[in-house]
Amino acid sequence: MRRVLFLLLLLLTAGNASAQGPVTTELFLPFIPNVQFAPVYVAIENGYFAEEGLDVRIRHGAEHDGVDLVAANQLQLGIFGGEQVLLARSQGRPVLSVYEWFQQFPAGVVATIGTDYESPREFSDLAGKKVGIHGRSGVTWTAFVALMNAAGMTEQDFELETVGFNVPELVCLGLIDAAVVYLNNEPLQIDNRISARDCGDLRGYRVFPVTPVVDLVSNVIVTNETTLEASPELVKAFVKAFDRGLQAAIANPAAAMLASSPYVEGLLAPGDAEVLASLASLASLAQLAMDEADRGTMLRVEGEVDEEDLEAQLEELRATLGRGLSTSAKLQSSVLLSTIPLWVAEVLGYSDRVSWVTTAAALQAAGMLDNAPDVDLAFTNRFVPGCAAGDACP
């Protein structure tokens, strides 16, 4: 009987929904609805999940709650930080990554440049400074600890202050000298305050991203071992559709903004939709090319990514998207465009084993992980479309 049920589940999740109807699947997303989740929204709105026989519903909440739900198989899929996978596995909870969404770690530290001291050139120059942190867990704390350890420093070298998510305001009020930040969001808010002359004596800031220093695993699609064993076709279908949504969001930010608007309250003001619709035929980034033979399911970089050229193109896109949009929509489009470089890779979704080993070592050095789990059980590339299609994966 168990084998019959197993075979039935495979049929239901094989991508052919004509007979049984779509399989309802709940996806856990941390935080609140946000334009940074655009690939998920695009995959829903463009029908990519539906084409794979899935009816994807979204549940938002605290990241640790989501990890608990997926680990207990109360939910089959979620998006979390790679460090959460390692922490969970060290506690015997059978979760694993099946797709590395962010290829660069989205967090770092900003240090203010005021009138009373020179610009910090090295992370170690922040010794003795008041540094705002979101808390002692999560992505930004992992980034801070990695930067701190790389500089040979300890918490005692700083005056740490828990500030929640009020970093832009506190920076502009001069109440902190530096702060951990999400690189694709909070610096933009500081920029806007500076442009509005609402940032006191602040002359600027220096950013210390973690990726050039330590290659850590960032946001990944997570499932559990039970689902992987019993319903591999469910995982395969979800990842394939998400991959298409990610490609589409990269290729057409204006359309991605439109697709996100039903899910993110207040994303667009009256008139913004019309402006974005007129820009929805915006060309893809020059470095990125869709493989037409695979109906757009694979994304490749033509040669190595020239970061300066990519940034120049993003700035042009940012200026184009900003024309005619409301202030809030302009900021959110900037967030999206600042996030795109964090997603781009030679093979979207691919996980490098070295980065998992490095992340485990960083967590151990921070005292967050007593015994590192077997990293080879913490991730798999078998569902990554580029790898599954037989392309060369390192």
Image (spheres, rainbow, N blue to C red):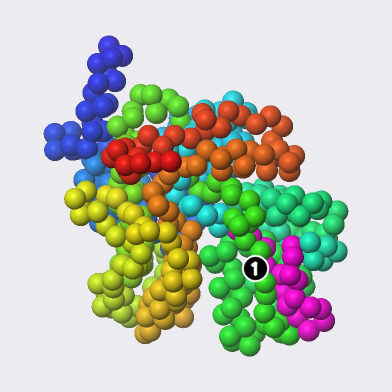
Q: Secondary structure at mark 1?
A: strand
In the displayed structure, 163 sits above or below 381; it is below
State left or right for residue 57 relative to residue 78: left
Which quarter of the rendered picture does the C terminus lie within? top left
Crowding around mark 1 (Cα neighbors within 10 Å: few <14, some 14 to 19, many 20+) is: many
Residue that appears at 44% across and 34% down: 380
State left or right for residue 237 relative to residue 378: left
- Point out the stretch of residues depicted in magenta: 107-123
Viewer can see residue 104: yes
Which quarter of the rendered picture does the N terminus lie within? top left
Of 121 and 325, which appears nearest the observer? 121
Of 153 and 263, which appears nearest the observer? 153
Q: Position of residue 217 (x, y in %)?
A: 55, 46
In the displayed structure, 249 sits above or below 5; it is below
Task: Identify the residue under disc 1.
Answer: 207
Identified by mark 1, the residue type is Val
Residue that appears at 61% across and 75% down: 190
Q: Farthest residue toward the front?
A: 303
